[in-house]
Image (cartoon, grey):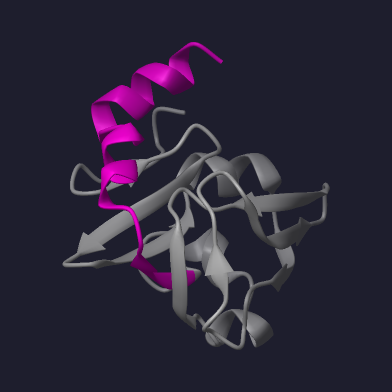
């Protein structure tokens, strides 16, 4: 776990998603730890059409790797503005660049208070140590 990257400017959920805050919108993806645990990602199902509502701690998609299929859990409530279309054909971007090219969706936040329930990078690293 020492080689994994968890940028300090992001917030993290206990279900291993990250958010990058940009005004009233957030970009969402899975953490370096999560992609490392999953292994090689071969397929991702996201809310491709946008305008879909997501709820904090609710499922927003699926991610399939050579090891397993897992649910993707939204760290925040709101409306999907867009999904990362590149992941349709190149799901491996999540493995290669989980915080840059491998982002999953942008959400217009409906309840800003929910951001206070997410962890800082330091808190997330501490959380991972206890797993």
- 130 drawn magenta: yes
Report the magenta residues as a range. 105-131
Which percent across, then down, holds residue 15? Answer: 56, 37
Left or right of 108 on screen, residue 47: right
Q: Is residue 120 visible?
A: yes
Left or right of 130 on screen, residue 106: left
Residue 113, picture quadrant:
top left
Which percent across, then down, holds residue 102? Answer: 47, 69
Which percent across, then down, holds residue 43? Answer: 75, 70
Front position in the image: 39 or 128: 128
Q: Is residue 16 above or below residue 77?
A: above
- The image shows a total of numbered marks equal to 0
x 23%, y 59%: residue: 21
- 92 drawn magenta: no
x 30%, y 23%: residue: 123
x 55%, y 60%: residue: 95
């Amino acid at each position: 776990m020492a080689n994994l990257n968890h940028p300090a400017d992001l917030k993290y959920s206990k279900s291993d998603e990250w958010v990058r805050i940009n005004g009233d919108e957030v970009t969402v993806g899975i953490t370096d730890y999560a992609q490392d645990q999953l292994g090689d990602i071969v397929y991702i199902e996201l809310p491709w059409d946008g305008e879909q509502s997501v709820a904090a701690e609710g499922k927003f998609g699926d991610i399939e790797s050579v090891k397993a299929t897992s649910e993707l859990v939204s760290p925040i409530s709101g409306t999907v503005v867009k999904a990362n279309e590149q992941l349709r054909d190149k799901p491996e971007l999540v493995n290669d660049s989980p915080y840059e090219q491998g982002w999953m969706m942008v959400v217009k936040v409906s309840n800003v208070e929910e951001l206070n329930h997410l962890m800082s990078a330091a808190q997330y690293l501490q959380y991972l140590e206890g797993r």
